[in-house]
Amino acid sequence: MFYNDDDKRFFMKQIKKSKNVFNYSIYSYCLMTNHIHFVFRVEDEFLSKVMQSITMKYSIYFNKKYNHIGHVFQDRYYSKNVESVRYFLTVCKYIHRNPEKAKIDKTDSYYWSSYREYVGREEVIDKKVLMSYFNNDIKLFKKYMLENDDITQIFNQAEYELKKKLTDEEVNLIICKKYRLSDASNILNFDYIERRNILKELIKIKGTSLNQISRITKVSAYIIKKIWEDD
């Protein structure tokens, strides 16, 4: 998506313009080389319009600049509702820590994320909401974002990485190939220990969910959850 900082600057200009048009709020963001993360507050009917406006203008710029033909964005954007304070805080932290996850820079020195705006000059974000949970204390904000969590655990939680959701057929095929099965439900034919070990491994499949795994393997979601929690 981005070959250099000029590309990122152009993209951020489109964000600023779209905010003025659609009147939405941004609480966190991070521009990576091949993907972006945002936490928006926007009316449902405007979300697709916001994304279409930004991606269309950037695609025109990119194709003209690099003599590129075709899609710049591989698929439609993926979105997930933020429905609790805990999730809001964690997903903002996850977004800010993305450069560390990719091993390209430290959170507090990466230029193209909203962390820089929180500790410096506000440009496109709306600071008040996130900072209110830290009593507007920048030291508490930094401590939470940089220190006081098992960041490896956060990185491993697929729900914070908005991956493309796999279909039942795709998940079934992944399981069948990995364990040489004709159907994922054949896991039920294994003895208890082997079945448990396989189910424990299935948590690593990105783009699926507990309920989908249960549906495909015909194993109770309660049992799978217990196995994942006990690991």
Image: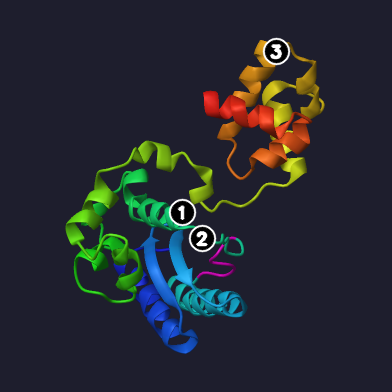
User: Where is residue 136 drawn, in percent x and y?
Assistant: 23, 66
**Where is mark 3, residue-wise?**
192
Q: Earlier in the sequence, mark 1 or mark 3?
A: 1
Q: CA distance from mark 1 to mark 3?
A: 35 Å
Q: Earlier in the sequence, mark 2 or mark 1?
A: 2
User: Residue at image x 41%, y 42%?
Assistant: 154
Q: Secondary structure at mark 2?
A: loop
- In the rendered structure, the answer to whether residue 198 lies left or right of residue 169 reads left
Q: Residue furthest front?
A: 135
- Colour mapping used in the image: rainbow
Does 219 lie within the magenta span? Answer: no
Label 1: how many Cα within 10 Å (few below 14, some 14–19, many 20+): some
Q: Secondary structure at mark 1?
A: helix
Q: Amino acid at mark 1?
A: Tyr
Residue 195 visible in this rendered orientation of the protein: yes
Vertical comparison of 78 with 230: above or below: below
